[in-house]
Structures are given as structure tokens and as C-alpha cells.
């Protein structure tokens, strides 16, 4: 999978792709992530990428010209399945969306900044808008990193145990069950005996029951 992320401050995302699972996925050639500086497509001495909004109001708006130049350049070399804009008013990111996107080959992710982008970008270049929650960040870079992480970890071969992703929270609309590791007892707090029994079928049944219980208690909306 290839993910091209367009940003005014791409250095904000460098660390996210330089460690742990994402680093290994990129090193193994299972994922390619390109951080693209939008200013490389800006014109003029100042490499300006934002301007005042027509009609007035506080804050600057990302201009259509450098964004259009960047996306058109990328699309002239690669076919993209989606051009995604990270936006607070996009569809809320869910595990289902991450699963869908992980099946694709090439993605562009545009990070908003300032007061957002010229609306014509959204109307004519963007195919999907995604939000990671009902709050506002300084820019879309952290959100793009979150989205990319949620997608890349699902690519076959990225996780050492590919069944691990299948037991994550929100798969099948259930939260993950409690997990334990050694020691089996700590300060009188014991691991449930069923997990020490070695009876795989009963353990799986217990885990499912715990997932349902935890979901009822913490996220009953998922069961609805």
C-alpha cells in the first residue's frame, strides 16, 4: 500500500512512521508512506499556501492553487483509490472504515491547517472526508497519522500474528476482553483461573462473554 500525505508541516509526522510497527511495515516494503510538503508546490518568493478568507473573518485559509498542483502532479504518476481530507466534519473514523481502506492500494491524505481549505478543493478533488473525533486540532497531521496507523497495521504481514488484529476492539462491534500476563498472582490479585486452564474452547467462550459484558457496560451504543 502507498499513502501520500500532503501537509504544510510534514515534519510533525516523521516520528509516527519512524518507530515500532509502522517502521517495520515500511522497512519490509509492505507499506510506503510519503510525506509531501505542500510548499514545494507553492509559487512566489514566499511559497505562500494560505490567504485571507473572502468575506472576512478570523484565520487563514489554505489556497486551492498549490493543493491542486500537488494533487494533479501525484495523480499524473499514480492512480489513487481515494483522496482523503482530514476534517472535523468528515465521517467519524471507525474500525470498519480502516478495514475498508486497508484493502486499497494507493491513498492521498490531505491535512488541513489554519481555518481549513478552500471549499473548491473539497468539491473537486476530495473523494472522502474523515474525522477522528468531535474536536479540533491545530492541523490534520496527527489525525492523518492516526488514520495511517489504523490502516497499515491491518495489511497482511505487518503484525507478527495476523490474528491479533481480528481480536482488537471494535472488530465485530465489540470491545476487546481483559488481558493478563505473568505473574499469575500479584499482591493477592489473581488472573482468572479459566485463562490458566489450557482449555482453548472455554477460554474463547470466556473472552467472548467478557467482550459482550464490557461493551454493554462501556459502549452500549455499539450493540445497538
Image (tube, helix red, strand yellow):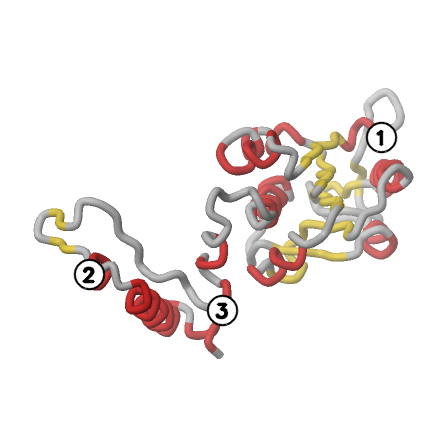
Work out which quarter of the rendered image holds the N terminus and state it. top right
Q: SS class of the residue under badge 2?
A: loop
Residue position for label 3:
173
- Distance, label 1 to label 3, CA atoms, is 42 Å
Q: Decide if residue 67 is on the left or right side of residue 110.
A: right
Residue in the picture at 48% in, 42% down: 160
Query: In the current view of this chain or complex, which residue is farthest to the bottom?
Result: 224
Residue drawn at the location 13% of the way across and 54% of the way down:
189
Q: From mark 1 to mark 2, how far is it between C-alphas? A: 58 Å
Look at mark 1 in the image and give the residue it sits on: 41
Q: Residues within 10 Å of mark 3 (few under 14, many from 20)?
A: some
Of discs 1 and 2, which sits in the foreground? Answer: 2
Which numbered disc, 1 or 2, marks the residue that appears first in the sequence? Answer: 1
Residue at image coords 49%, 58%:
166
Residue 142 position within the rendered picture, expressed as x and y whole percent measured from the top left: 58, 41
Front-most of residues 8 and 24: 24
Q: Residue at x 30, y 55 (%)?
A: 179
Q: Is residue 99 left or right of residue 221?
A: right
Q: Position of residue 150 (x, y in %)?
A: 56, 49
Q: Residue 35's spot in the image, x, y percent?
A: 70, 32
**For mark 2, what is the residue?**
192
Q: Nearer the viewer, residue 21 or 86?
A: 21
- What mark, if any, has residue 19 been given in the picture? none
Image check: 165 left or right of 73? left
Name the mark nearer the viewer: 3 or 2: 2
Amino acid at each position: 500500500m502507498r499513502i501520500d500525505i500532503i501537509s504544510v508541516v510534514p515534519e510533525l509526522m516523521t516520528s509516527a512512521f519512524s518507530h515500532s510497527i509502522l517502521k517495520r511495515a515500511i522497512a519490509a516494503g509492505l507499506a510506503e508512506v510519503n510525506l509531501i510538503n505542500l510548499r514545494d508546490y507553492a509559487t512566489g518568493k514566499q511559497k505562500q499556501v494560505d490567504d485571507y478568507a473572502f468575506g472576512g473573518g478570523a484565520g487563514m485559509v489554505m489556497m486551492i492553487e498549490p493543493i491542486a498542483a500537488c494533487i494533479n502532479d501525484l495523480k499524473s504518476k499514480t492512480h489513487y483509490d481515494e483522496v482523503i481530507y482530514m476534517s472535523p466534519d468528515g465521517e467519524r473514523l471507525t474500525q470498519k472504515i480502516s478495514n475498508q481502506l486497508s484493502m486499497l492500494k494507493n491513498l492521498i491524505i490531505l491535512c488541513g491547517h489554519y481555518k481549513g481549505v478552500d471549499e473548491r478543493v473539497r468539491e473537486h478533488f476530495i473523494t472522502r472526508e474523515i474525522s477522528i473525533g468531535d474536536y479540533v486540532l491545530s492541523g490534520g497531521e496527527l489525525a492523518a497519522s492516526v488514520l495511517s496507523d489504523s490502516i497499515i497495521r491491518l495489511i497482511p504481514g505487518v503484525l507478527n500474528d495476523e490474528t491479533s488484529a481480528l481480536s482488537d476492539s471494535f472488530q465485530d462491534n465489540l470491545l476487546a476482553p481483559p488481558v493478563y500476563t505473568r505473574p499469575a498472582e500479584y499482591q493477592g490479585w489473581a488472573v482468572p483461573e479459566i485463562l490458566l486452564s489450557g482449555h482453548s474452547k472455554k477460554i474463547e467462550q470466556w473472552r467472548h462473554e467478557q467482550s459482550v459484558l464490557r461493551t454493554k457496560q462501556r459502549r452500549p451504543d455499539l450493540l445497538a
